[in-house]
Amino acid sequence: MKRSVLFGILTTIVVLIGLLIVGPQRIALADENTGDEELAQKIRDNSSNAQNQITAFTLQTGEATFAGLGADENTEVEIGSVSKTFTTELLRQQVESGDIELETTVGDIIDVDGSAVADVTMVELANHTSGLPRLDKDNLGLFRTIFTENPYTGITQEDVFNAARNASLSGRGEVAYSNFGVALLGQLLAVNADSEYVDLVQENILEPAGMDSTYVGSETSVSEYAPRGLSADGRKTDAWGMDGYAPAGSIRSTAADMAKYAEFMLDNSEFGFGWFPEETGGLWHNGGTGGYSTMLIIDPEKNEAFFANGNTPQGVEDLTRALRQEGE
């Protein structure tokens, strides 16, 4: 708890310093509606002035409806930590195929002899109960975000493994959200499959789901011409391409492809771990990068899903829930 409070205080201080240094720039909601007019109006009615472009869908009775403000269903965006659900889906698939078990430990896959993390299990990493911290070290990368830079630059798979070997655990068994834990999980799944994380996602999710416009954004795979989001003060941000931390938040997609992902998950997944229960039913996961915010709600019982993404850090959680409420 103390670590989380300190992290939050540090984050606030960093943001305030950044605003003092560079000064705010105006962010305005895009004028242009795209896609379904009724849904676009609902998006506009439930958006805030701290948002700019938004792309969204509703998926009900097997039919996806798309709309947006200044962006459409084919606009490429960063989905941030919604990427974690791809990683936990890969775990589910390896468990189903018998290639791994939920109780397989870190030490069963890589050499971590003598480390506190040695007996941490796959399901603990997936459910954020491993005791690992949110990040693998003090997040000095936060200071880079003041200047709209990517805080995960230069972190490799081996860096993640080395950090795990040197990590200490705190509050194991309690839920404490950990980017580090899911990054470690995804890299362990890659080693377990004798593959690369990028290839696992491509072969086991993107291709089966027909997601042709989605990819794992590494430090080298994001084009200089790919869209960039806006920082909280309105400046264009760097793309958050990641290597070591890719399983925790580096996927780039579109609303059209995320609708395909939702259908794929509804048809195939058991949602046993890696998601959070929604009060009104179903499950959710959100995500945020330096320039994007994302929310995905999936309800397996009703066979429906709702998604929104904005190109600023302003959260779209309330917006996505409003789209769901108005659609019922």
Image: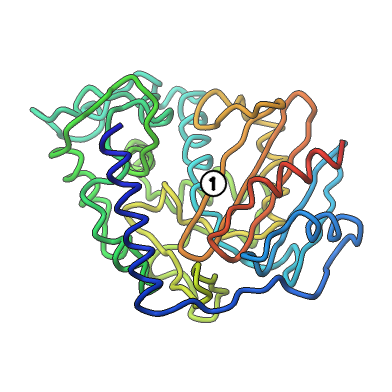
Q: How is the image coloured?
A: rainbow
Q: Residue 260 at what x, y percent from top left?
A: 71, 48
The residue at 30%/46% (across/down) is 7
Above or below 159: residue 92: above
Camera-nearest residue between 320 and 239: 320
Q: Quadrant of residue 227?
A: bottom right
The C terminus sits in image quarter: top right
Mark 1 secondary-structure assignment: helix
The quarter of the rendered structure image containing the N terminus is: top left
Residue 72 at what x, y percent from top left?
A: 75, 66
Work out whether 10 lies above or below 301.
below
Give the image location of residue 188, x and y in percent: 32, 38
Residue type, mark 1 in image: Val
Residue 20 is left or right of residue 284, and the answer is left
At x 72% / y 66%, what residue is drawn? 74
x 49%, y 76%: residue: 24
Front position in the image: 202 or 33: 33
Residue on which disc 1 sits:
82
Side of 150 relative to 209 (left or right): left
- Label 1: how many Cα within 10 Å (few below 14, some 14–19, many 20+): many
Q: Which residue is drawn at the image coordinates 68% and 53% (left, top)?
A: 308
Position of 251 relative to 321 (above/below): below
The quadrant in which residue 296 appears is top right
State which quadrant residue 190 falls in: top left
Residue 43 location, x and y as percent?
Answer: 78, 57
| Front position in the image: 268 or 278 | 278
